[in-house]
Amino acid sequence: MNLVEHAIKYGLKIGADEVHVRYSRSREFSVDLEMNSISRVNYRVGSGLSILLFVDKRIAAAAVSNPSEKSVEEAVEKAYKMARASKPNVNWMGLPDPKPLPKVEGVYDVRLSELEPGEAVEIMKKGLSIVREKGNVNVMQGSLSITVSKVHIGNSRGIDCSEKYTGLNASLVAVAQEAGKVGSFAYETYSSRKFDLNIEELAESVAEKALSSLHLKPVESFKGSIVMDYDFSALFFLMLTMAYNGFHVWSGSSPWRNKLGEKVAAERLTIIDDGTLPGGVKSSSFDGEGLPTMRKTIVRNGILEKYINNTYTARLLNMKTTGNAASPLDVSPSNTIVEPGDWKPEEIIGSVKKGLFISRYSGMINVVNGVVSGTVKQAFYIENGVKKYPVKECMISSNLYEMLSNITAIGCETKDKGGIIVPIVKIDNVNIISR
């Protein structure tokens, strides 16, 4: 008997009505860079088991690291005692029954699982060397991590599923100096399920970004267009996922509550959530409660079509689950895809009369009230369709939902930024504020 099955049977034996269990085992190594050199190599192996236990609509959770039968039984007993002492969740309607699962390709790569730490070190040395060849560019930080994992989920209603995964995450942070002047920090990231990292491309890109950020100039306050580069675009649409998260919709914190079938964005915008995307960083055959993942359109041509749900929120909203359970009590997006448009990057920039091309953003994107206010970095001033110069840190101020309506161009190419697959996006009527 495996530990998942043991935890479920033991929970029912001591008096639980229902039990949900998640077991994970992983090994990971990482190579870290700091100040132009390899700073450390880490190796970790571990496992964990988490339990959700239900007694008369009372819910309690417990978790144990590197579990054994004895420690699992102790965790189940603690969860049972906590549940008995808790107040009932009157909205709880039970765990889900099993359903057939899709076969999702590309979530496990044998070559990546066999990669040795020494190979990873050589990869990062090569990336470091490429950046340093630029002469006046320093690598401030960097990392390459490789993860091999297995997840097993089961519940007392018959769900029993497991899957193996691999993951690669790489990043480089660089800054350029010239004649005593320091540019703004530049960074590049890459994530994948397989061993397909092009370290030369990553290093060249971060070095180019760093060099292009020298000779910063201030910009005066104005209202104009912004062009979100891939990293800013990914952050923007990641934050937006909370607006169509079923839990936030049910709780009333999302302005998109009761907006299905209504226009919520510019007609050119389509957003998809896809847990079955082949090779997707956030792909799997099942979600956090063991139900099948799926592909669904959230916003189609500016019209809100669907919320993402687990079983719990779907029942509360009188809907069906969309395979987006982080757990039986939590909802999370899978791969978020913004459909590309038909604009080439140079055409988008060429269409800007006055504005900024922004790679990095640090600040507030409040999904509840829509407030967007923060600092832009790695930005370039655009005038009459031409990138003029890199700008010193300035601020932007707008409203998230107005920005969605003011999208006027979407790029024809996309990049996967950690499971957020986005194009370059142009938004008009944004306040740019000098600092």
Image (cartoon, rainbow, N blue to C red):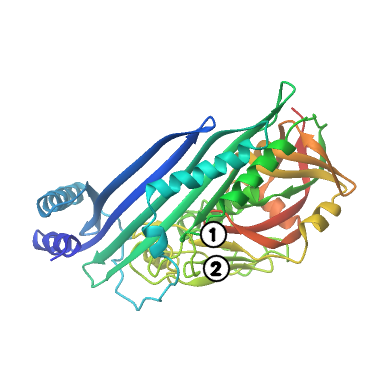
Give the x, y percent position of residue 376: 68, 37
- Disc 1 crowd rating (10 Å Cα; few below 14, some 14-19, many 20+) is many
Are the residues flagged by discs 1 and 2 in contact, CB closer than 8 Å? yes
- Label 1 belongs to which residue? 244
Quadrant in the picture for the C terminus: top right
- Give the residue type at disc 2: Lys
Quadrant in the picture for the N terminus: bottom left
Q: Residue furthest top?
A: 180
Give the x, y percent position of residue 111: 41, 62
- Give the residue type at disc 1: Tyr
Give the x, y percent position of residue 39: 44, 33
**13 sits to left or right of 403:** left
| Residue 234 visible in the shown view | yes
- Label 2 belongs to which residue? 306
**102 sits to left or right of 11:** right
Instruction: Decide: is 223 above or below 55.
Output: above
